[in-house]
Every structure is written in structure tokens, then in C-alpha cells.
């Protein structure tokens, strides 16, 4: 029988090698991927999120835990695909046109990835057309946009308009964030959600997933 | 190959802490229209930007109207308050660097405003122009070739032609590695980015900027900023996302890469957002610009007063052209800066006043945050001494990191700096990492190749 506590601890402590090895051993011993995910991995990431919220963990601890989770998921994903189990949502993320700031976007992307989501990072200075193309090609459930400059915020609206024009707006939830962005602005431009920080963004994606 | 330094700084230009004062630099700088920086007075440096709007052909006339209005109102306030001198800083937005003619057009407009004001009111003034470093458009970034570099170089050239008095940049070489290393708290990676990659890029880039300045007499190579490195860390630490201890050590180490600009050609004033400025001033003797409490229009700060303690220009970082009760925000912040400078200059006019004022500004913040603790005059002298005592940028970066850790640990041991348990745990991590760093940068480069090799292009750093 797999020791679920070992996997839980490995993720909580951000030990990717250990998480990978324990998962490998558990699968060899006959553990089911979903049991590992629901029994150890998700609870561990929830605890990591709690520690971060309570300012016990900094971003490095958070990202290292995410990296450990990802290393375990790499072993589970092919088995889940083969057995037809439902995978986590896909998220397309990018910093909008005209804006080169990416550290906030990277944190959100890494945290989403660490929480088991399939993240497609388009980088910075992403044009509305590039967002549209990514939605067509990758068929995500979420589009996350970031901006640090007030003068690039209007690109968020332009991108939402482009999704609308391409007939894709109802196929994805659009979430926005970045230092100058507000909930009011999200409402004004017709985004589906806003978060002022990275952990809030993960929670928002989860909430919207649950509501879907 | 690392670019050969044109100037070596192996000793301090300001040898004693008492001489490290605001408004005074051993190498004052004459620039622009009758302005002398570092010659005894602190002047406001006003930086301003657009409100939320698209920047495109169809809005270009509106963009120009905003800049014209901002310049007019800033100078109106400066004249009204009888400031003895002023610097305007125009930081190009990405579309204005992508299309260098746009940045040059605004530069020209601002210079016309400054010239008219100088002629009419005899206001000593200068225009600093800072194009956007957009060389990281490709992954991995191309620093020495490609469209990003071509736009940046063309921007420097056209803005110099259009009337810039001071050229600056917030360069980003090494940031592609630093971002990841910082986020994962990987100190080896941080040292590699700050001590190996970034100085190589700064040296090369400032060799190029120096050439542009040489071709445009009267245009001064100002200085660089570790904004993308140390300010990113400082702001993330301020939001409790990174340890403050780590961010403060990053700040101290970042001075080495910014110094590389001076080793090539920079003569100051260094950039306002370069909080490593006092270290640069102590080493080079050139004047610096700083920002703090009166930059709250742009960001919050744990170093509101202490950052003014050794400045020569006092800046607001950036303010949008939006309406406030008194007037538009750029004019409002001009007034704030003007009064800050008046007080500093009035204090400096009395015997011992500058030193007293400096020490008040220092003691108000010094032990309330690690970031402030490494910014005091005494910390500045220790960090600057450690840097000039080492030979290569790599060794200098390590030396600066070590002394910053000592300053912070001493502060905790003496019960002046209060840090949480989880913050103090980072002392151990950083200490261990510093001890385990290889003696030479080639070994570090090899060690980190599997982890970071795909993030940067070796040719971009002459490797």
C-alpha cells in the first residue's frame, strides 16, 4: 500500500525528486492515480496555499511545492489519459500587447501549474490575435491576461472584443490581473473575474471550474 | 569576452561617511540648460506618463497633447515655486521605443518646452530620456542583435538628436535568469544573473550608449538601474511574496551590475529607481537621482525618507496625467518634490545642517525594514568598500552579498532590526549558498547550465 503521507510531505516540502520517486513506487504497488491526487496531492497543495495565505510560506516555497506536484503529475497524466479520466482545465495565460512585464504573470502561471492545471504561457506583449489563435488551437477553458502598465490595460478590452468577434467568447472564461487592474475594470470590460494576487487567481479558477 | 572596463574603480571616491551627503558629489555634472547637478543643491526630477489609453496612430495627436500639457504644467509649477533647477524625465513607453520616431517626437516637444521656459524664466533645466529596454521580446532574449536591440539603439540615436540631455536605461540583461532564480529562491542562480550575466550586458550596452553620446555633443550618458532585478525583489518582498532579507541582499549585490555602466562611460545622474545609487555615488563620485516618499503615486516604499539622504536629484518615479483636486497629478507631484528639495536645501544652507538632515532621514527608516538597513550611509560605505575591494564583477557581487547579510544579522543581534523567524531562516540559506559558491564564474556557469542554460543565449553575453 502506498504511503500517502510521504507524498503529501514531499509536496509540502517542495521536494520534487522525492515526490516523483514516491509516486513511481505507489503506482508500481498498484495505487490508482485519482487516489494519489485526491488523497495526497490536492490536500498538500491546499495546505501549501493555506500556509502562503497565512504568510508562513513565501513564493519560493509555494513554487517548489508546485514543482513537486508537477513532477508527480507527469507520471499520473499518461495513465489518466489512457484510462479516459478527466484531466484538469487548460489555461492560456499572457501579458497583453504593449506590456513586457511578466513576473506576476509567471507566478500565476506557475501556481496554476502547481495546482494541476494545464498552463499554456504565451509570454509577454501578446496581441489580441495571438490570444484568439491560442484559444482556437489549444481550446482552453480559461484565458488569463496580465498588465502592469495603465497604458496597456485597454489591450485587455481589445482582446475580449477580439474573442467576441471570433465567436469564442462563450467558450472561455476570461480572468484579468496586474497592479493597476481592479474588479471594477474587470466588470467594465466584460471579464469573468479578477484577482489581486496569484493565490487568489488559483482560487478563482477553481471556483469557476466548480461552477461550470 | 567581457567588455574591457574603460575606467576601473578600485577605491572609493567618497572615503568617509560624513562626506556622503545629499546635494553634493565630488564630480558634479553640468548638463542641459545651465544645470549643475551635485554642486550643492538637490533638484526635483519629475517623471510623468499617460493615463490609461491606447497608443496608436489614431490616438497619437492625443498622446502628444498629454505630454505637452504635462510639460507646460510641471514647468508652470516649477517657476511658480522658484525651484533653482529641474530635470524632466521622459520614460518611453514600449510602443514609443518600438517606433523610435514617436519617442523622438515627444523628446523634441519636451525640449522645446524646456528651452522656452529657460529662455523666459532662466530656469536651469535638463531632459533625461529613457527608452524601454525591449530586447527580451524573443525567448531566449537577443541582447546584441535582433529587432529589440535595433529599436533600442535607434531610440537612443533619435532621442539624442531630438534634444535629450541625459540618456538612461533600465537594462534587463540577465533578468531572464534572475526572474526564475528569484521566484524559486535559488541564490546561486541569483548570483549568476547579477554577478555574471548582468555586468556583461551592462558593460556592452553602455559601450554602445557611450558611442551615441560621443556622436551627439552635449548628450550625457546618465546611468542604469537594477529596477528589473532589485526593485522587483523589493516590491515582491513588500507584498510578503519574497523574504525581505533576500530582497535586501539582492539590492546590495545589484550595485555591481549598475557600476558596470560607470566603468564604461556613465557619469550620472544615475536613474531614480536605482536604489543602489548611494553605493554608486560613494564609489564613483558622480551624482545620483533617488525616489522615495514622493513617489507614492507610482508605488509604496519602505525607504521613503532614507532614500533621500544621499540624493542629488529627487524624483517621483512616475505619475499619470490624471486630474486631482489641485490640478493634474504631474503638476501636483512637482510641488511635492519642490518642497522636499526646498527643505533639504534650506537645511544644507546652515552649518552642519545637511549632515543633521541626512541623519534624521536615515534614522526615521533605517531599522524598520531590511531594505532600509542596507541603504543607510554606514551600510552604503560598507557595501561600497566590499565591492571595490574585490576584483571581478562575480567576486564583487559575492562580496556585496556577504556584507549585506552581516549588516542585517548585526541589526538583529543588536535588537535594532526585528525580523520574523521565517525571515531569519533565510540568513542560513543565503549564508550556505554564499559559502558554497565556486571560486570562479566559469565553474558556476557550468554548474548552472542544466538549470538555466535554455533561458539565455550565450552570445548575448559574449560567452
Image (tube, rainbow, N blue to C red):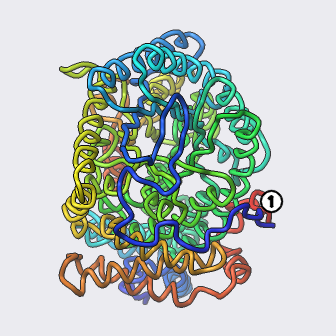
Q: Residue at x 23, y 22 (%)?
A: B324
Residue that appears at 56% across and 20% down: B106
A113 versus B189 height, above or below: above
As drawn, is B147 to the left or to the right of A63? right
Extreme-front residue of the structure = B351
Q: Is residue B304 above or below residue B133?
A: below
The local secondary structure at tag 1 comes to helix
Please name the residue that numbered disc 1 is placed on.
Answer: B459
Q: Is residue B138 visible?
A: yes
Q: Nearer the viewer, residue B179 or B12?
A: B12
**Position in image of residue B188 (x %, y %):** 56, 77
Give the answer, above or below, for where A86 lies relative to B338.
below
The chain letter under disc 1 is: B
Residue at left offset 74%, top offset 51%:
B207
Q: On the image, which quarter does residue B42 sit in?
A: top left
Residue B157 image point, x, y percent = 72, 32
Identify the image quadrant of the C terminus of chain B: bottom right
Amino acid at each position: 500500500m502506498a504511503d500517502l503521507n510521504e507524498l503529501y510531505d514531499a509536496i509540502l516540502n517542495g521536494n520534487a525528486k522525492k515526490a516523483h520517486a514516491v509516486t513511481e513506487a505507489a503506482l508500481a504497488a498498484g495505487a490508482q492515480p485519482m487516489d494519489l491526487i485526491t488523497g495526497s496531492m490536492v490536500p498538500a497543495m491546499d495546505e501549501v496555499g493555506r500556509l502562503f495565505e497565512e504568510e508562513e510560506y513565501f513564493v519560493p516555497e509555494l513554487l517548489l511545492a508546485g514543482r513537486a506536484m508537477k513532477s508527480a503529475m507527469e507520471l499520473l497524466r499518461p495513465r489518466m489519459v489512457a484510462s479516459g479520466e478527466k484531466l484538469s482545465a487548460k489555461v492560456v495565460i499572457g501579458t497583453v500587447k504593449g506590456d513586457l512585464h511578466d513576473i506576476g504573470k509567471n507566478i500565476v502561471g506557475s501556481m496554476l501549474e502547481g495546482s494541476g492545471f494545464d498552463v499554456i504561457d504565451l509570454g509577454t506583449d501578446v496581441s489580441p490575435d495571438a490570444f484568439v489563435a491560442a484559444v482556437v488551437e489549444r481550446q482552453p477553458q480559461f484565458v488569463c491576461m496580465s498588465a502592469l502598465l495603465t497604458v496597456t490595460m485597454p489591450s485587455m478590452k481589445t482582446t475580449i472584443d477580439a474573442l467576441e468577434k471570433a465567436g469564442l467568447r462563450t467558450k472561455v472564461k476570461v480572468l484579468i490581473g496586474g497592479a493597476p487592474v481592479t474588479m471594477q475594470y474587470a466588470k467594465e470590460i466584460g471579464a469573468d473575474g479578477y484577482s489581486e494576487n496569484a493565490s487568489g487567481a488559483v482560487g478563482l479558477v477553481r471556483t469557476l471550474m466548480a461552477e461550470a | 569576452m567581457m567588455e574591457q572596463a574603460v575606467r576601473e574603480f578600485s577605491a572609493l571616491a567618497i572615503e568617509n561617511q560624513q562626506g556622503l551627503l545629499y546635494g553634493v558629489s565630488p564630480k558634479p555634472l553640468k548638463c542641459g540648460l545651465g544645470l549643475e547637478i551635485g554642486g550643492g543643491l538637490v533638484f526635483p526630477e519629475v517623471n510623468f506618463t499617460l493615463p490609461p489609453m491606447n497608443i496608436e496612430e489614431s490616438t497619437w495627436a492625443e498622446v502628444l497633447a498629454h505630454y505637452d500639457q504635462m510639460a507646460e504644467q510641471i514647468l508652470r509649477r516649477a517657476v511658480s515655486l522658484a525651484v533653482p533647477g529641474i530635470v524632466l524625465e521622459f520614460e518611453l513607453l514600449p510602443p514609443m521605443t518600438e517606433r523610435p520616431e514617436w519617442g523622438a517626437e515627444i523628446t523634441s516637444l519636451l525640449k522645446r518646452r524646456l528651452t522656452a521656459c529657460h529662455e523666459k524664466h532662466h530656469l536651469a533645466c535638463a531632459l533625461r530620456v529613457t527608452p524601454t529596454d525591449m530586447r527580451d521580446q524573443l525567448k531566449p532574449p537577443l541582447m546584441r542583435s535582433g529587432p529589440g536591440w535595433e529599436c533600442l539603439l535607434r531610440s537612443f540615436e533619435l532621442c539624442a538628436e531630438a534634444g535629450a540631455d541625459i540618456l538612461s536605461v533600465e537594462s534587463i540583461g540577465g533578468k531572464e535568469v534572475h526572474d526564475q532564480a528569484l521566484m524559486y529562491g535559488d541564490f546561486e542562480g541569483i548570483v549568476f544573473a547579477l554577478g555574471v550575466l548582468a555586468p556583461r550586458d551592462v558593460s556592452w550596452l553602455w559601450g554602445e550608449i557611450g558611442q551615441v553620446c560621443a556622436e551627439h555633443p552635449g548628450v550625457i550618458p546618465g546611468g542604469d538601474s537594477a529596477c528589473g532585478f532589485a526593485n522587483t525583489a523589493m516590491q515582491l518582498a513588500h507584498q510578503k511574496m519574497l523574504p525581505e532579507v533576500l530582497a535586501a541582499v539582492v539590492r546590495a549585490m545589484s550595485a555591481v551590475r549598475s557600476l558596470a555602466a560607470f566603468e564604461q562611460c556613465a557619469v550620472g545622474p544615475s536613474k531614480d529607481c536605482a536604489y543602489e545609487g548611494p553605493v554608486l555615488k560613494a564609489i564613483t563620485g558622480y551624482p545620483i537621482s533617488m525616489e522615495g516618499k514622493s513617489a507614492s503615486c507610482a508605488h509604496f516604499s519602505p525607504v521613503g525618507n532614507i532614500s533621500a539622504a544621499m540624493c542629488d536629484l529627487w524624483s517621483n518615479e512616475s505619475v499619470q496625467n490624471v486630474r486631482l483636486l489641485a490640478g493634474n497629478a504631474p503638476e501636483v507631484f512637482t510641488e511635492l518634490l519642490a518642497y522636499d528639495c526646498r527643505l533639504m536645501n534650506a537645511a544644507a544652507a546652515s552649518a552642519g545642517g545637511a549632515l543633521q538632515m541626512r541623519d534624521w532621514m536615515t534614522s526615521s527608516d533605517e531599522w524598520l525594514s531590511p531594505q532600509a538597513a542596507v541603504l543607510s550611509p554606514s551600510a552604503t560605505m560598507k557595501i561600497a568598500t566590499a565591492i571595490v575591494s574585490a576584483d571581478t564583477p562575480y567576486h564583487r557581487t559575492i562580496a556585496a552579498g556577504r556584507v549585506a547579510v552581516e549588516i542585517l544579522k548585526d541589526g538583529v543581534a543588536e535588537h535594532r532590526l526585528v525580523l520574523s523567524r521565517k525571515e531569519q531562516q533565510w540568513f542560513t540559506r543565503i549564508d550556505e549558498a554564499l559559502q558554497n559558491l565556486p571560486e570562479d564564474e566559469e565553474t558556476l556557469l557550468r554548474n548552472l547550465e542544466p538549470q538555466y542554460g535554455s533561458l539565455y543565449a550565450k552570445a548575448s553575453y559574449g560567452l
